[in-house]
Image (tube, rainbow, N blue to C red):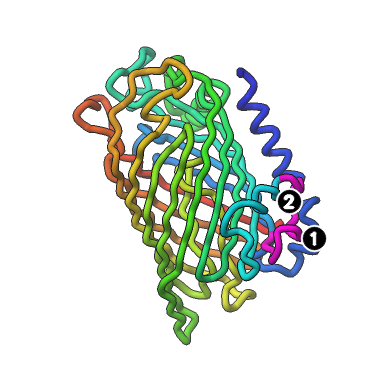
Amino acid sequence: MRNDGKDLACLALTLLFTSPVMAGGVHTQGQHLREAAKYRFELDNDAVVGSDNQFSSGWSFQYHSAISNHWHSLKTPADWLLRPAEDLPGLQNEALKKRFNISVGQIIQTPGKLKEHDRIKNDVPYAAIIAAQSTWLAYDDKNFQGYELTLGVLGPPALGRQAQNFVHRIQGINEAKGWNNQLNTEPVFNVNVMRKKKFYQYQGPSGLSLDASIDGHAALGTMFTLAALRLETRFGYNMPGGFMYSPDPIGHSMIYDASLNPPAPTRPSWYGTASASAVAVAHNILLDGNVFRNSQTPVDKEPYLFMLTLGLHYETPTWGAHMDLRITTDTVETSGLNSAEDADNTFGTLMFEWKV
């Protein structure tokens, strides 16, 4: 299992970098960023709130296909990647646009005392996951249906120690000393389902607009098992159609792009987003520990979470830049975490996207 993480990353990156060839210029040329084939790079980190505890950092590199009216005409790195969409409920509606995503990413979790060599029993364990994800979407400006499959590896092959300490060396920060105590190596998988419905839209004469949607999603697997309900709003100038994206560090929610062209495709778009979520968590491998092997004593997690996500977005016809801040209630029981720097999972996100 030592090379599983590297092999998985190499496979996903190969698919990502070969995808423009498979996508073909005919599908992207002349299209706006919102409907064209595109790349995205997402970086998540809790440094913006002065923390390096619990969720420490995450990143993902994503390829999103150009939208199509039919699955059979949608271009992907390999035809077999579209076969699940033929059988999944809600994805065959001919009135909805179709889109496919493939991505690779990593998440890292650390306890509060990074200078300790020994295992810290009353804090979250060291843990890292590297995974590849595929997402199948069908949507328009009012409805959204999505499915996601995540396959990856937990433990040393996920290269958490190397990634974190490399960044710390660049920043001149002390390296984390306790990675020998990280969760054990094992495969991880997750299936996520999401449904959205837009229930309010306003379009002003000056180009200002506002909309609101309700989002219900669920995750089932060895990484996360949870159910969530989210209220989403968007507001701004020349806002694209479709639905907002809520940043996701692998597996908790979903990686997707469910957007449509803005009213004035040649002009830039400026808009903000806000969402509030209620989440019921049955399983979180980062807190509960290994599923298939003996693991550390699990941390007592909170079964219910509330999240607030705020975002600012700027987009042109060919590229976009996005900033988000996610604020959560406590994810773990504070009574048993005397050494923890924080008990929530607040973090910031930077995301850049560009048209293929």
Residue 71 screen position, x and y as percent: 70, 58
- Upstream in sequence: badge 2 or badge 1: 1
Circle 1 sits in a helix, a strand or a loop, which is it? helix
Indicate the quadrant where residue 115 lies.
top left
Q: Which is nearer the eye, 275 or 253?
A: 253
Instruction: Tell me if residue 73 is in the magenta stretch.
Output: yes
Q: Name the residue under label 1.
A: 25
Residue 270 screen position, x and y as percent: 49, 69
Residue 69 screen position, x and y as percent: 69, 66
**Amino acid carrying mark 2 in the image:** Thr
Task: Look at the image and tell me in which quarter the N terminus lies.
Answer: top right
Q: In the picture provided, is 143 more to the left or to the right than 355?
A: left
Instruction: Tell me if residue 59 is in the magenta stretch.
Output: no
Residue range (magenta): 66-80
Extreme-bottom residue of the structure: 205
Would you say residue 39 is visible in this rendering? no
**In 3D space, how far apart are the residues under numbered discs 2 and 1 (Cα atoms)?**
13 Å
